Image: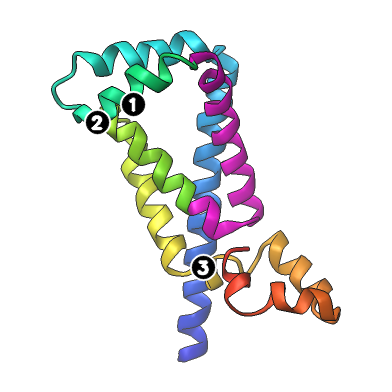
Amino acid sequence: MAACTRAVAVVVAVAARVALGVLWLREGLVKYHAGFGAADIRLVVDSTASNPRVPSLYQAFTEHVLANVSTLFGVAVPLLETALGIALVLGLLTRAAVCVSIGTLMTYWLADQLVGQYPVMVSLSVVVLLAPVAATRWSVTRLLAHALRDRPRCRAVTEGQAALWL
């Protein structure tokens, strides 16, 4: 029974990781195809400035940071989303990618960008975050760790706490 429960946990966690990755890939690729850029970031800045649902601290961030480097964020946002998607689908730096995923989604919510799939993405992120070992059972990282496990220099990275971040 325990082996069956573990197998189900692995399937659920891996499916959550891959589904989250596909959703992030979709987000990033849609932005690339739509020509996302500095003008889109400036729209976020303008919409947060007058929105009472946006916390004042985030309004200050958009006014003083996003507004001044909108070109950088216009390139970085779709790049980040696509990189998160690739990392999660392949299972590379899974725990770090999930933490960035949650942080990114929270910034979108702070900007009052309430897209229907964002709660789903946070839920998938939490599943992966709560089951990092199961979520990376079938991943590129697991394959690399297995290939490197007999090398003394790599053992510290592929075992123990460090491995949870891979």
**Residue identified by numbered label 3:** 132
Query: What's the amino acid at mark 1?
Result: Phe
Q: Residues within 10 Å of mark 2 (few under 14, many from 20)?
A: few
N-terminal-most mark, 1 or 3: 1
Q: CA distance from mark 1 to mark 2?
A: 6 Å
Residue drawn where x is 43% and y is 16% of the image = 41
Magenta span: 70-98
Quick one: SS at disc 3?
A: helix
Q: Are marks 1 and 3 in contact (CB under 8 Å)?
A: no
**Residue identified by numbered label 2:** 57
Q: Position of residue 165 (x, y in %)?
A: 58, 64
Q: Is residue 123 above or below residue 33?
A: below
Of the two numbered discs 1 and 3 in the rendering, the one whose residue sits closer to the viewer = 1
Q: Is residue 95 above or below residue 152?
A: above
How many tags in the picture? 3
What secondary structure prevails in the magenta region?
helix
Q: Position of residue 78 (x, y in %)?
A: 55, 27
Residue drawn where x is 24% and y is 15% of the image = 49
Q: Are marks 1 and 2 in contact (CB under 8 Å)?
A: yes
Q: Is residue 74 magenta?
A: yes
Q: CA distance from mark 2 to mark 3?
A: 32 Å
Query: What's the amino acid at mark 2?
Result: Leu
Query: What's the amino acid at mark 3?
Result: Pro
Q: Which mark is residue 61?
A: 1
The quadrant in which the C terminus is found is bottom right
Q: Is residue 134 above or below residue 32?
A: below
Residue at the bottom extreme, as displayed: 1
